[in-house]
Image (cartoon, helix red, strand yellow):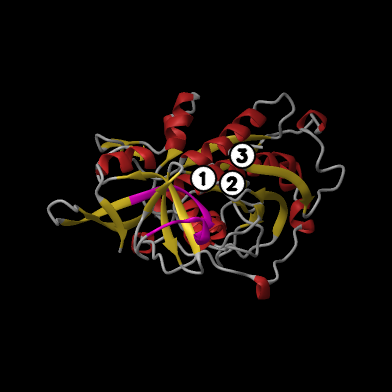
Amino acid sequence: MQSGVMLRRLCTCIRASSSSSSSYSTINSTAKKKKQLVFLGSPQVSVSVLDELLNASKAPNSLFEVAAIVTKPPSKRGRGRKMLPSPVAEHALERGFSPDLIFTPEKAGEELFLSNLDALQPEVCITAAYGNILPSKFLKLPSLGTINIHPSILPLYRGAAPVQRALQDGVKETGVSLVYTVRAMDAGPVIACERVEVDDHVKAPELLVLLFDQGSKLLIRELPSILDGSARLKAQEQDNSKATLAPKLNPEDAWLSFDQEAVVLHNKVRAFAGWPGTRTKVRILNANNGEDNTLELKIITTRTCSLSDVQYDEKDDVTFIGGSLVFPCGGHSALEVLEVQLPGKKVVTATTFWNGLRGQKLKKL
């Protein structure tokens, strides 16, 4: 159990043969030359994959080495909005990886970048949340193909936001797939997958960490078969008729509408946690002077309850019960808000926010 998520090895969708799934310690140590592997990744969740690859490459009988790392260019991050390398580049440098072998092209189709990569003669490329589209010219370079760690059980949730869209749909189970990259989005043959049970309260950032951590371990188990070519033979084509899409998140989608059922809103809060977050506007009424102000709130943590458990005077009243702001919702349900954030302020508990109202009424819009 980790952060409300329970992992269970329900299945390895496609298992390697006993010879190709053996550990690195049993791989034939008479190999003449280590195979050249290139890793592509950018955000923090990719770091666990890079770590597993670097560690495995240093094993005594490893048949591969990480020849280069490809990541997004430096960008403005943090409070000071300073230009910083991607988390993957930063971690690679901390581990002593040569800066000359960390490539940061704006686009993966740049001619100079492809020329430099080709000179390394990569035999396999591994992608994990790289964040750039790989053109055909790139995909032709590695002789053993490009393999992607995709955080869903393909063909479900193909696209840019599989974890977020799965949580938004309220799924009870998801997983991670190891898949050959083709020009069609997330549509290549699947080498292996692993399933994960999803708790009702886990948020997208937590689930992403878990899935990429499990994906890195799945990759290491399957890497021998990828390197000897047998993975290509056992990989299974996806059933396109069962494919679902996971389009990227849109900031305009962050607003909550309380005419929907509470469980729909709760799942959206979990799915959009981190970025872009979920927001609502509330009215604050001062009974003493009649002032009526509108306030924007970022909703951080929620749970659901029945509206029959809530006492309120008017249907748009927001009440405070047991440490939660309770919003009446559609379908005779209610959303309990446990944490909120005002623009430019820190996250606070519902209790702290309610006390700050000093007796003023709170109403939903």
- Residue 170 lies left or right of residue 282; in this view the side is right
Residue 243: where, in percent of width, then height?
Answer: 63, 70
The amino acid sitting under disc 2 is Ile
Q: Compute the Cα span from label 3 to label 1.
A: 16 Å
Crowd rating for badge 2 (residues with CA inside 10 Å; few <14, some 14–19, many 20+): many
Which residue in the rendered view is the most extreme toward the bottom?
A: 241
Q: Which residue is mark 2?
A: 126
What SS does tag 1 mark?
Answer: strand
Say whether marks 3 and 1 touch (CB < 8 Å): no
Vertical side of 46 occupied by 180: above or below:
below
Decide which of 331, 245 is in the foreground and name it. Answer: 331
**Quadrant of the snapshot with the C terminus:** bottom left
- Residue 116 lies left or right of residue 237; in this view the side is left
Camera-side mark, 3 or 2: 3
- Residue 78 lies left or right of residue 10; in this view the side is left
Q: Is residue 134 visible?
A: no
| Dot 3 or dot 1, earlier in sequence | 1
Is residue 92 a member of the stretch shown in magenta? no
Q: Which residue is mark 1?
A: 40
Decide which of 156, 109 is in the foreground and name it. Answer: 156
Residue 252: where, in percent of width, then height?
Answer: 34, 63
**Quadrant of the snapshot with the N terminus:** top right
Decide which of 108, 282 is in the foreground and name it. Answer: 282
What SS does tag 3 mark?
Answer: helix
Say whether marks 1 and 2 touch (CB < 8 Å): yes
Mark number, residue 278: none
The region drawn magenta spans 298-312
Crowd rating for badge 3 (residues with CA inside 10 Å; few <14, some 14–19, many 20+): some
Decide which of 229, 203 is in the foreground and name it. Answer: 203
Q: Which residue is mark 3?
A: 213
The amino acid sitting under disc 1 is Leu
